[in-house]
Image: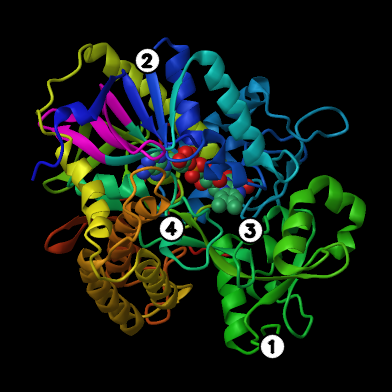
Amino acid sequence: MAYLSTDKVEHHFHDVVIVGSGGAGMRCALQLADAGHRVAVVTKVLPTRSHTVAAQGGINASLGNVASDHWHWHMYDTVKGSDYLGDQDAIEYMCRAAPLLVRELEHQGVPFSRLDDGRIYQRPFGGQSREFGEGGQASRTCAAADRTGHAILHSLYQQNLRAGTHFYQEFFALDLITGDDGCQGLMAWDIARGEYHLFQAKAVILATGGAGRVFRVTTNAHICTGDGGALTLAAGLPMEDMEFFQFHPTGIADVGPLITEGVRGEGGYLINANGERFMERYAPTAKDLASRDVVSRAIAQEIREGRGCGPKKDHVLLKLDHLGEELIMSKLPNIHELALRFADVDCTKDPVPVQPTVHYTMGGIPTNRFGEVVYSKGRNKEVVFPGLYAIGEAACVSVHGANRLGGNSLLEIVVFGRACGNQVMKHLREHRYHAQLDVDCWQRGAERVERWLSSARDRREGPSIADVRLRMQTIMQEHFGVYRTEELMAEGVARLESLAGEMDRAVISDGCGLFNTELVEALELENLMALARVTAAGALARRESRGAHARDDYPERDDERWMRHTLATLDSEGVKLGYKPVRTSPMTVESFPPKKRVY
Ligand SMILES: Cc1cc2nc3c(=O)[nH]c(=O)nc-3n(C[C@H](O)[C@H](O)[C@H](O)COP(=O)(O)OP(=O)(O)OC[C@H]3O[C@@H](n4cnc5c(N)ncnc54)[C@H](O)[C@@H]3O)c2cc1C
């Protein structure tokens, strides 16, 4: 149904359109703009409000500034951390490139904390080892106090302004324009002015970040609604490994804001209601610095067995007062402020109440290590979808597999932001002209907006966005949490599918076109719902425990049947699941075969 005439749509031409101005989008934009291409960055918030700004603890690179280190050990830790679901070619590429990319960030203006001799400060983080696990704890995480993401994002933004990148801020991406030749552009909505914009491009890059808001308690910002993934599903392409959501062990109890793993890296530790350092029982060697899935399960287990703290016995305590006020105020000032503001605790004196909180989307839009979006054709044949790319937390390349190591995500966004930029340049050499678009290619995107606005103008009756969203988040939280079972998840899938049916009846009350935040939330909820459905279906089907996906009824990892990636598509008939093998061959070194993961 045509709602609008073409003159209501502003038409832009760029070589490349990047959706997202987080670290991934900005690093990629910089690579392309510096090479002289006409680059647009479309972002639904002001560029420096992207979630990258909230990253605290740091970025991994085997600089070896504090203790000896090697990229190969970093690779080993990442493969092991991924519970052998990570693709080893991409992991090798990332770990080898890390030192270069971190030094490059320093030259671009990131004010890293320093050692006394002037080199970049590095702190220990979870799951880091030397000599392939035999040489003890590594110190691999480069930090700018506990505001590393803030420093990186602002530096990259400034570099992009210098390079002449075009920013379209507070624009909401509605739909991908795809045809036989692949992706040709994007339809977007200017939130402030209430106008439609058609971006025509030779390449479109999705850098839309994670989808933590699928759950109720999360460290993720309200804008982390997985929009790029939903656009990919709507284009008929799959999402990969969405059942793997990382629970960070130390979100502030009840509310969710993150207390960085850097606190434990600096010497903080967890205690239960008896004042016992319980991690010694679960991970005798790495203790509080075991990988995140292990620590989260340990906390959940303590709470289950009645050793939780507080009146509801539903959290544990993170003790750091023994580190001293001077260290806390110089290395962890942001944590001090967060604990005061959200838990009313002065962490220089008292421990902070914490619980596992949804933190990171390991799954995402399937790509190869050049950032090209791929899908499966026939059995085991992977093909590239031309003109469409994905990077950062929105993508699944997959370097994190079933569990991400702290400090590897800021690394991923710069490494693959740059790699994708380089690959797009090759594509641009072969695609010098814009494609011819269908005259009504923008209608599907516009309909998304018009449907919601008309629900308000016609004063239709129905459930509100806030109501449906809360119900969806509660289902995900209750049925797809740290521990999962067949029965629990099957019930969750049924509840979710019936709730998804209610989306057709949902309404908004504000029918104004200008800065309509309720409309934006409605569009985001559509996206969240699609991702929740593929997450739930993928989780129910995976009958094993691996990384962040822990099942009481299948407590062991099953490499024979399940060392493979889930691929989920979504259409009017519901979710369909397929699978593809893990890429176990690295580029130049021998592969790390699966073995039991102990810390
Ligand atoms: C609290 C917190 C702390 C963290 N700390 C660390 C850490 O110390 N170390 C580490 O390695 N990792 C950390 N992480 C993870 C890491 O910060 C993120 O994975 C990473 O920054 C994601 O970057 P990104 O560029 O992919 O996406 P984001 O920074 O999330 O940016 C997404 C962009 O997409 C845009 N966008 C989304 N949807 C649309 C749409 N429909 N239309 C237009 N624009 C859209 C947004 O406006 C935004 O610009 C942390 C995460 C959190 C939540």
Question: In the rendered image of this protein, does residue 395 appear above or below residue 249?
Answer: above
Mark 1: amino acid: Pro
Disc 3 marks which residue? Answer: 258
Residues at marks 3 and 2 touching, judged by CB atoms closer than 8 Å: no
Q: Quadrant of residue 410?
A: top right
Disc 2 marks which residue? Answer: 38
Closer to the chain start, of discs 3 and 2, is 2
User: Which of the two marks, 3 or 2, is nearer to us in this view?
Assistant: 2
Question: In the rendered image of this protein, does residue 261 appear above or below residue 17?
Answer: below
Q: Quadrant of residue 426?
A: top left
Closer to the chain start, of discs 4 and 2, is 2
Magenta segment boundaries in residue numbering: 175-204
Disc 3 versus disc 4: distance between alpha carbons? 21 Å
Asked if the residue at label 3 sits under 8 Å from ligand 1, the reply is yes
Closer to the chain start, of discs 3 and 4, is 3
Asked whether residue 124 appears in the rendered view, the answer is yes
Q: Which mark is residue 311?
A: 1
Which residue shows up at 15% across the image and 37% down it?
Answer: 4
Neighbour class for label 2 at 10 Å: few (<14), some, many (≥20)? Answer: some
Provide residue 208's location: percent of width, then percent of height.
Answer: 41, 42
Disc 3 versus disc 2: distance between alpha carbons? 37 Å
| Front one among 79 and 509 | 509
Neighbour class for label 3 at 10 Å: few (<14), some, many (≥20)? Answer: many
Disc 1 versus disc 4: distance between alpha carbons? 34 Å
Residues at marks 1 and 4 touching, judged by CB atoms closer than 8 Å: no
Disc 4 marks which residue? Answer: 402
Neighbour class for label 4 at 10 Å: few (<14), some, many (≥20)? Answer: many
Provide residue 201's location: percent of width, then percent of height.
Answer: 26, 23
Disc 4 versus disc 2: distance between alpha carbons? 37 Å
Disc 3 versus disc 1: distance between alpha carbons? 22 Å
